[in-house]
Image (cartoon, helix red, strand yellow):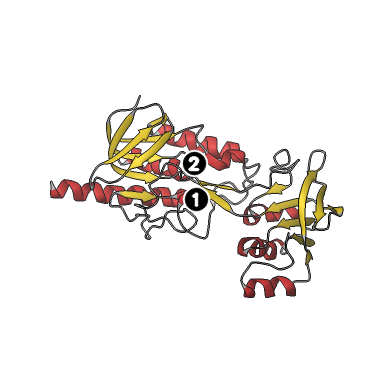
């Protein structure tokens, strides 16, 4: 049951939030971790994680999230369910969280770990094949596609960077783009055009992903209405990500143009006593391992802020 006030509130229970909770509990801070669903975040929907240290054989996303949660509970991390409607950061010292059910609480320090979600195509087969050939992270999943044919959807920097990375493993990468030119920076385009493993399918957009127990075909339609299909073993979708920021005062936190929260190297935001960690943070690398690290760094920053408050009282 939530109290009226805490030294520290951690908003979000993904890898960053669970790591922060672990460090907060070990530091004996008066804390609460608030998660609207089951702890684990996007990791829960990840089929397999092969690059998290300590698991040489790899581990399913569900099991990794479960182990992180159990680790946190071992140190009595205070986890409560709740959905925050808005956060008031106008008071210099006290942060106020307002919940959809009408309750509210205040805290001295706040760590925002609300995460982000990849944009989806919204086509038939995408959700059904997620983790079975549909991926939103080349860095995470590329090694599973050695000597296979894959498709990359998108034409921005991330799509082209990931396409180039995928060629280290895949035998062929087909970039499917709805326009006749890329939006990526010129140097990335040059790298892609020079890569013999990359082919381009211009002026086409995906319409369906098909397969029995794994991806086998990507159906596309050209701008002139012509339908066709690609025989592929994987479909990597890079059409942007959306931050989970609906409850955040973006102006006060000085969010960037995409709605992510800028911080310094210690994960401190523009608001004293407020930190951001994980995928909600404005950055270029979004991996489970650095989210967990940022959660730990955020708690150390929160401790330093709390010590400063005590010294100035």
Q: Are marks 1 and 2 in contact (CB under 8 Å)?
A: yes
- Residue 100 point in image, percent of width and height: 41, 30
Q: Nearer the viewer, residue 271 or 162?
A: 271
Element class at badge 2: loop
Q: Nearer the viewer, residue 266 or 154?
A: 154
Identify residue for label 1: 279
Residue at image coords 71%, 47%: 134
Residue at image coords 74%, 47%: 133
Does 94 appear above or below 182? above
Residue at image coords 42%, 54%: 261
Total numbered labels: 2
Q: Nearer the viewer, residue 145 or 250?
A: 250
What is the CA distance from the residue labelled 1 to the residue labelled 2?
9 Å
Q: Say whether disc 1 or disc 2 marks the residue closer to the N-terminus.
A: 2
Does 15 appear above or below 164? above
- Give the quadrant of residue 82: top left
- Left/right of residue 47 with respect to residue 21 in the rendered view: right
- One can see residue 45 in this view: yes
- Residue 284 point in image, percent of width and height: 52, 60
Identify residue for label 2: 14
For label 1, the crowd category at 10 Å Cα-Cα, with few meaning under 14, some 14 to 19 and many 20 or more, is many
For label 2, the crowd category at 10 Å Cα-Cα, with few meaning under 14, some 14 to 19 and many 20 or more, is many
- Give the quadrant of residue 85: top left
């Amino acid at each position: 049951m939530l109290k009226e006030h805490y030294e520290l509130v951690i908003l979000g229970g993904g890898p960053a939030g669970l790591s922060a909770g672990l460090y907060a509990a070990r530091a004996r801070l008066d804390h609460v971790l608030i998660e609207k669903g089951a702890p684990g975040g996007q990791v829960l929907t990840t089929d397999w994680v092969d690059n998290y240290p300590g698991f040489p054989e790899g581990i399913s996303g569900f099991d990794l999230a479960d182990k992180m949660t159990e680790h946190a509970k071992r140190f009595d991390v205070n986890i409560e369910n709740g959905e925050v409607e808005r956060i008031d950061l106008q008071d210099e010292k006290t942060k106020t969280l307002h919940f959809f059910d009408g309750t509210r609480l205040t805290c001295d320090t706040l760590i925002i770990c609300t995460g982000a979600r990849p944009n989806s195509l919204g086509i038939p087969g995408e959700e059904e094949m997620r983790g079975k050939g549909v991926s939103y992270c080349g860095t995470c999943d590329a090694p599973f596609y050695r000597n296979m044919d894959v498709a990359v959807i998108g034409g921005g920097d991330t799509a082209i960077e990931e396409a180039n990375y995928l060629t280290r493993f895949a035998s062929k990468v087909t970039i499917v783009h709805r326009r006749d030119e890329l939006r990526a920076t010129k140097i990335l385009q040059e790298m892609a055009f020079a890569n013999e493993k990359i082919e381009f399918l211009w002026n086409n957009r995906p319409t369906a992903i098909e397969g029995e127990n794994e991806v086998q075909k990507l159906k596309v339609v050209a701008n002139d209405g012509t339908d066709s299909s690609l025989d592929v073993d994987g479909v990597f979708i890079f059409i942007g990500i959306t931050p989970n920021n609906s409850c955040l005062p973006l102006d006060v936190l000085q969010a960037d143009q995409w709605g992510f929260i800028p911080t310094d190297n210690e994960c401190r935001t523009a608001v004293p006593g407020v930190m951001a960690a994980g995928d909600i943070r404005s950055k270029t690398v979004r991996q489970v391992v650095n989210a967990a690290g940022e959660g730990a760094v955020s708690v150390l920053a929160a401790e330093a802020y709390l010590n400063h408050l005590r010294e100035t009282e």
